[in-house]
Image: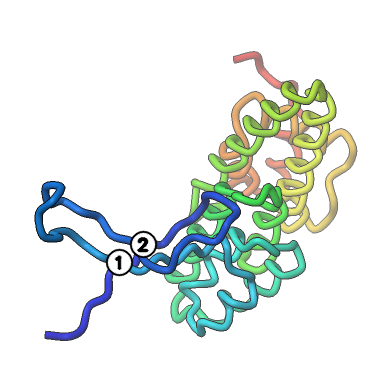
């Protein structure tokens, strides 16, 4: 039989270092030990360089959890995944896992929106292949709104969310049309994203031909 090691990969928790090993006891108290012993790998307590040093693209997906994660470091991680994945399908899966890890955000780095744009810059068209990205934008908006309510800064958070949506979808518009959106087009993109959802706007940006896309953005937004 090949050797097998049980490992508990911990994504968030206390700031103090976790022990290197743990156990789950299932035997009655006072009886000989029966259960499982396992190694504890608290990836959220590692640094980006420690995760990269493991030598596998699999561990790179945990980089957003690292205590010293920054936008610059994650840009290098995104490039490493792009170069190290063996197939386009594997790249899409790794990028999706990377974005899911960023939503956990144990150290409050707030890098999800930047990371989404990095991934789209590196892998054009990934938004179409992974609809979960649109859901992540909505979740980030919800969390941002909750933080704004708690801090009494809801309007400031909304402006930040609108800017993030405009930047992300504006880049996609620029790739399709060959220019940045005008102020009116950008306003229409944001309004439609809020009314029908970023995912629906992404689909339109990807599916409509250039002239049809410009006409669609110029049309009055129909009430739902």
Report the front residue among 184 and 150: 150
For image coordinates 50% across by 46% down, the residue present is 132
Report the front residue among 190 and 85: 85
The residue carrying mark 2 is 8
Q: In which quarter of the image is residue 77?
A: bottom right
Local crowd at mark 1 within 10 Å, few (<14), some, or many (≥20)? some
For image coordinates 40% across by 65% down, the residue present is 40
Give percent across and percent down for residue 190: 75, 33
Q: Which of marks 1 and 2 is in front?
A: 1
Dot 1 falls on a residue whose secondary structure is strand
Q: Quadrant of residue 46?
A: bottom right
N-terminal of the pair, mark 1 or mark 2, is 2
Give percent across and percent down for residue 86: 45, 81
Q: Contact, CB < 8 Å: mark 1 with mark 2?
A: yes
- For the image, the number of numbered tags is 2
Give percent across and percent down for residue 89: 43, 69
| Quarter of the rendering occupied by the N terminus | bottom left
Position of residue 119 relative to residue 185, above or below, is below
Q: Which residue lies furthest to the right in this view?
A: 183
Position of residue 187 relative to residue 74, above or below, is above
For image coordinates 55% across by 48% down, the residue present is 104
Give percent across and percent down for residue 98: 54, 60
The residue carrying mark 1 is 38
């Amino acid at each position: 039989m090949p050797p097998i090691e049980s490992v508990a990969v911990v994504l968030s928790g206390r700031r103090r270092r976790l022990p290197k090993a743990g156990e789950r006891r299932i035997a009655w108290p006072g009886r000989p030990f029966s259960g499982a012993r396992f190694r504890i790998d608290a990836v959220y307590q590692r640094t980006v360089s420690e995760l990269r040093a493991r030598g596998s693209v699999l561990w790179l997906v945990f980089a957003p959890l690292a205590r010293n994660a920054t936008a610059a470091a994650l840009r290098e991680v995104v490039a490493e995944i792009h170069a190290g994945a063996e197939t386009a399908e594997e790249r899409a899966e790794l990028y999706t896992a990377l974005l899911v890890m960023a939503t956990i955000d144990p150290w409050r780095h707030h890098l999800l929106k930047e990371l989404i744009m990095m991934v789209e810059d590196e892998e054009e068209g990934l938004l179409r292949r992974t609809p979960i990205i649109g859901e992540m934008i909505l979740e980030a908006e919800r969390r941002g709104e909750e933080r704004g309510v708690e801090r009494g800064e809801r309007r400031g958070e909304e402006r930040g969310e609108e800017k993030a949506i405009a930047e992300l979808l504006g880049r996609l518009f620029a790739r399709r049309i060959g220019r940045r959106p005008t102020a009116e087009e950008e306003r229409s993109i944001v309004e439609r994203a809020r009314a029908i959802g970023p995912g629906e706007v992404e689909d339109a940006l990807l599916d409509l031909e250039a002239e049809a896309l410009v006409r669609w953005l110029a049309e009055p937004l129909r009430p739902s």
